Image: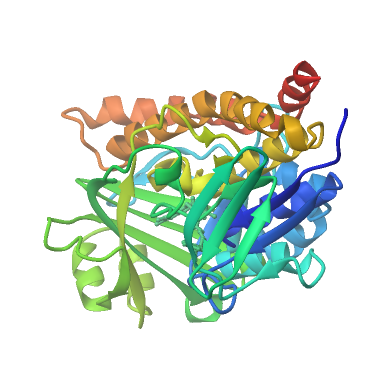
């Protein structure tokens, strides 16, 4: 490897950007993260971590913290019809039987990822407004007047990415026709709710999910309901708990009793994008939702962004300043097809969850059979193939 090691600027301090920063630093690379918000943070909601990303969190030394702050879900996890009739167990392990499926509070995960890095790596209050590159130099401009030069720029700035148009012509995200009401409840307000199970109820055009977070002290819920064009007006806004209760009236009484406790909820319009044909231009590449926003019906958006970060770090660790563009193309090649499969799979699974079937028996059989897909998803370890891609570069 000739030349010196590349320095990397990451735009966006969400789960994707912060994990990538940790992974790059673990590979000895110099990284800075630029986040538009004045402080790092996340909405009061859960995120579900699965073995394919927990494996990577362990590699950067965060396994014990995930065990401590997460809530492991186990064999009591189930799918039900809307009235509470059981359909099938939920796959909570990979094929080897390793149970590394955890509910986490999103704020806890962001804090763990940020806290694992030295101070000075993350620069808040930096909203990226422009990008340019020529030859060996790439430059990012921020609304506060700062201009940063780096050998590599990683756009981890989410579904509305400011930087994506520098890679691929702008396009509109695709509205799914659904919104998600999300929130958390202290377990003491629903003391009989299981603290070790992922539970989902499936009904006509709607589904309802709960899982524990923060070592079971808090229960995360999400209610997915149809929405028309008027209702989608914002990406994320406060929702009305009474409207949420009405949406699930007449469902399993367990849901009704949980929703009685809800005093505040957030509504999230669900969008994805068609898979992009390219993620990289020269020294700029995309990661996480900036590259591949997906519907949440496989619970994989954050998990895939973590896989992206580890793949990128493994490949860039073998690059020098001059070989960065080739390394970024190798990263993109490695990730694009797997992520596109997950994006498509999330759309298909949403149809199962929303019971878009004439014969629900067929749907129930597919839900049970889906365990095989989940095992393949969870078995994946992005590192060996990233190492092979990196070796091929040198
Ligand atoms: C209802 C719902 C449920 C979900 N549940 C799960 C789940 O269970 N499991 C799972 O794996 N995934 C889940 N996801 C998906 C997951 O939230 C995302 O895919 C994941 O967080 C990856 O995000 P990211 O870091 O790429 O982008 P984001 O989280 O959007 O972060 C982008 C960051 O970039 C910053 N930013 C934006 N623009 C700029 C700019 N111009 N300059 C500087 N900074 C900027 C933003 O402030 C933000 O901090 C869910 C999503 C939804 C909507």
Q: Quadrant of residue 255?
A: bottom left
Q: Residue at x 62, y 33 (%)?
A: 378
Residue nearest the viewer, comparing 210 with 229: 229
Q: Residue at x 24, y 56 (%)?
A: 225
Residue nearest the viewer, comparing 80 with 49: 49
Residue nearest the viewer, comparing 354 with 294: 294
Specify the quadrant that holds the C terminus. top right
Residue 63 at x, y percent in the picture: 79, 53
Compared with 352, 108 (above or below) is below
Q: Residue furthest top?
A: 392
Residue 25 at x, y percent in the picture: 81, 52
Q: Quadrant of residue 165?
A: top left
Q: Residue at x 74, y 32 (%)?
A: 322
Residue 286 at x, y percent in the picture: 53, 42
Compared with 229, 282 (above or below) is above
Residue nearest the viewer, comparing 198 with 75: 198
Classify residue 158 as left or right of residue 386. left
Q: Residue at x 64, y 39 (%)?
A: 307
């Amino acid at each position: 490897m000739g030349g010196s090691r590349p320095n990397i600027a990451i735009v966006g301090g969400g789960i994707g950007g912060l994990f990538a920063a940790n992974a790059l630093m673990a590979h000895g690379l110099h990284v800075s993260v630029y986040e538009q918000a004045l402080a790092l943070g996340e909405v009061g909601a859960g995120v579900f971590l699965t073995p394919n990303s927990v494996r990577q969190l362990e590699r950067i030394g965060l396994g014990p913290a995930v065990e401590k702050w997460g809530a492991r879900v186990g064999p009591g996890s189930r799918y039900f019809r809307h009235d509470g009739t059981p359909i099938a167990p939920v796959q909570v392990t990979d094929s080897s039987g390793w149970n590394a499926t955890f509910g986490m509070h999103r704020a806890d995960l962001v804090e763990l990822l940020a806290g694992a890095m030295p101070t000075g790596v993350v620069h808040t209050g930096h909203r990226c407004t422009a990008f340019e590159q020529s030859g060996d130099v790439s430059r990012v401009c921020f609304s506060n007047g700062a201009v940063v030069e780096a050998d590599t720029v990683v756009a981890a700035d989410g579904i509305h990415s400011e930087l994506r148009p520098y890679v691929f012509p702008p396009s509109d995200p695709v509205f799914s026709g659904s919104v998600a009401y999300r929130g958390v409840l202290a377990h003491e307000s629903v003391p009989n709710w299981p603290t070790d199970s992922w539970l989902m109820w499936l009904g006509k055009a709607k589904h309802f999910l709960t899982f524990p977070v923060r070592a079971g002290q808090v229960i995360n819920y999400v209610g997915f309901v149809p929405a028309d064009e008027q209702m989608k007006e914002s990406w994320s806004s406060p929702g009305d708990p009474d409207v949420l209760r009405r949406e699930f009236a007449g469902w399993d009484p367990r849901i009704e009793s949980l929703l009685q406790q809800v005093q505040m909820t957030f509504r999230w319009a669900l969008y994805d994008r068609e898979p992009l044909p390219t993620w990289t231009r020269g020294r700029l590449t995309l990661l996480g939702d900036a590259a591949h926003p997906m519907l949440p019906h496989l619970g994989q958006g954050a998990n895939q962004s973590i896989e992206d970060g580890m793949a990128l770090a493994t490949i860039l660790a073998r690059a020098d300043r001059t070989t960065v563009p080739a390394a970024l193309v190798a990263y993109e090649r490695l990730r694009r097809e797997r992520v596109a499969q997950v994006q498509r799979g999330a759309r298909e699974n949403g149809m199962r969850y929303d019971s878009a079937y004439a014969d629900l028996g067929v749907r129930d059989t597919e839900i049970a059979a889906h365990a095989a897909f989940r095992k393949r998803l969870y078995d994946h370890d992005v590192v060996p193939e990233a190492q092979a891609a990196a070796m091929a570069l040198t």
